[in-house]
Image (cartoon, rainbow, N blue to C red):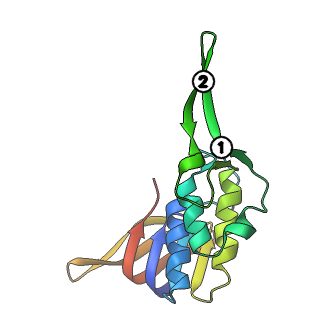
Amino acid sequence: METLSTRCCIAGGGPAGMMLGFLLARAGVDVVILEKHGDFLRDFRGDTVHPSTLEIMYELGLLDEFLKLPHQELHQATAQIGPFAVTIGDFSHLPTHCKFIAFMPQWDFLNFLAESGRRYPSFHLLMNREATGLIEGNGSVCGLHANTREGPLDIRADLVVAAAP
């Protein structure tokens, strides 16, 4: 059985886990993200990146690079009610740099976060690693058990975060 040690172990490489992993690595915290799949190419619940998330990307200095990825922008949403077109959402007044919702496959968003995280030596994304249980000691959680193609893996960590559904 292989054993790793890290400051933070995150179970789940979805949007929350990947963003947390990126932010921690950017701050110099050694982080391991476990993702049970070998890639991000599968259907998710949504393919929208909201203005608040785009604002975070701006604050992190990632927005210009991110918006180079193929995407569509929704600046205003309307609905047809009988003969009338009614505006049901207008993003032009938001106090953000991007006054739109970006439509983009979630796998592109996750791959972008992974590539951005890899710029930091403390960012470790382990694909094909499924968290299967907690490691407990002295009355607290101190790591995760995981399954890999190569066999079992234990990750000891000061902080364990569950970011998987």
Q: CA distance from mark 1 to mark 2?
A: 14 Å
Residue 43 on image: x %, y %:
65, 45
Residue 151 on image: x %, y %:
57, 73
**Residue 153 badge:** none
Asked if residue 35 can be seen in this view, the reply is no
Residue 56 on image: x %, y %:
55, 67
* Secondary structure beneath label 2: strand
Label tally:
2
The residue that mark 2 highlights is 79
Residue 53 image-quadrant placement? bottom right
The residue that mark 1 highlights is 75
* Secondary structure beneath label 1: loop
Residue at figure coordinates x 49%, y 85% from the top left? 3
Q: Are marks 1 and 2 in contact (CB under 8 Å)?
A: no
Depth check: give the residue in front, 108 or 148.
108
Amino acid type at mark 1: His
Up the image or down, 26 lies above or below 18; here it is below
